[in-house]
Amino acid sequence: MSGKSDRAKGKLKEAAGVLTNDKRLEREGKLDRAAGEVKEKMEEAVDKVKEKAREIVEHDEVHGQGLERTVSPGSPESAPPKK
């Protein structure tokens, strides 16, 4: 479920809780709404990261640069091959 749909569901539950004087349902609605807001922020952050990654890859392709794999010193990959 997306953040927007969680927020909408939360608003409906919260309103139903207020109308029926059901404090538990009202709290559930507030929680769903808050969870939806967090999901939306996460979705926005993921979209920004994906867009930035696309920009980097496109830039490298245009300028003939590839993404190089780096190896940390001391990692198993940096050791010389065994004979």
Image (cartoon, rainbow, N blue to C red):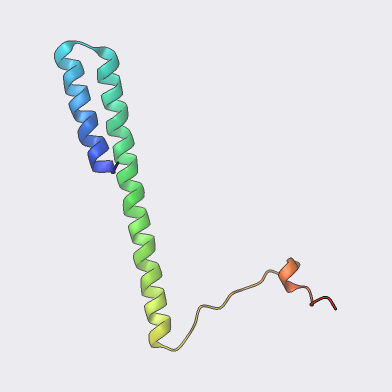
Name the residue located 29 percent from the left edge and 38 percent from the top edge: 36
Q: In which quarter of the image is residue 30?
A: top left
Name the residue located 30 percent from the left edge and 30 percent from the top edge: 32
Vertical position of residue 47 compared to residue 53: above or below: above
Q: Quadrant of residue 77?
A: bottom right
* Left or right of residue 22: residue 56: right
* Left or right of residue 19: residue 56: right
- Furthest residue in direction left, as rendered: 19
Name the residue located 21 percent from the left edge and 24 percent from the top edge: 13
Give percent across and percent down for residue 22.
23, 12
Whether residue 73 is visible: no
Whether residue 5 is visible: yes
Name the residue located 36 percent from the left edge and 73 percent from the top edge: 55
Give percent across and percent down for residue 71.
66, 72
Give percent across and percent down for residue 66.
49, 82
Vertical position of residue 13 compared to residue 36: above or below: above
Quadrant that contains the C terminus: bottom right
Quadrant that contains the N terminus: top left
* Left or right of residue 29: residue 57: right
Vertical position of residue 34 compared to residue 70: above or below: above
- Furthest residue in direction bottom, as rendered: 64
Q: Nearer the viewer, residue 2 or 14?
A: 2
